[in-house]
Amino acid sequence: MRKPKRYVEKYREIGRKVAFYRNIRGLSQEALAEKIEVSVSHISKIEAPQANSAFSIDMLFLIAEGLEIDVAAFFNPIEISSPYIKK
């Protein structure tokens, strides 16, 4: 399936949020990748500022689980005292 170019910026924004929440958790890309059992390059591609690749909703759920946040955090504005971060 061909990915529509109109969603590229949305994927990039999600990637920025993955990096943001990963840093809040004090995890490196390597640590997150190990925790959710994916390659470091996969996490790196998702977080890359000029990312041009899509990823599955399953991957997003897996990342959210690894970061201990609600998946909704990737679709809403970042808040410093985020209600999406599980304590």
Image (cartoon, rainbow, N blue to C red):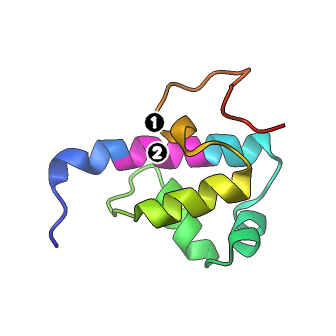
On whether residue 62 falls in the magenta region, the answer is no
- Rendered image quadrant of residue 62: bottom right
Q: Nearer the viewer, residue 31 or 49?
A: 31
Secondary structure beneath label 1? loop
- Rendered image quadrant of residue 36: bottom right
Image point 76% across, 59% down: which residue?
28
Circles 1 and 2, Cβ within 8 Å, touching? The answer is yes
Residue 19 x %, y % = 62, 47
Secondary structure beneath label 2? helix
Q: Which residues are magenta?
A: 11-18
Image point 52% across, 38% down: which residue?
72
Residue 76 x %, y % = 48, 29
Left or right, residue 12 beside residue 41: left
On whether residue 17 falls in the magenta region, the answer is yes
Q: Look at the magenta stretch and give its main secondary structure.
A: helix
Examine the rendered structure and indicate whether residue 59 appears above or below residue 80: below
Disc 1: which residue: 75
Residue 33 x %, y % = 68, 70
Image point 78% across, 66% down: which residue?
31
Q: Considering the image in quadrants, where does the N terminus appear? A: bottom left
Image point 83% across, 48% down: which residue?
26
Residue 68 x %, y % = 74, 49
Q: Count how many numbered circles sit on residues in the image.
A: 2
Examine the rendered structure and indicate whether residue 2 appears above or below residue 24: below
Disc 2: which residue: 14
The kind of residue on which mark 1 rests is Phe
Q: Mark 1 or mark 2: which comes first in sequence?
A: 2
Q: Nearer the viewer, residue 4 or 40?
A: 4
Determine the CA span between mark 1 and mark 2: 7 Å
Q: Considering the image in quadrants, where does the C terminus appear? A: top right
The kind of residue on which mark 2 rests is Ile
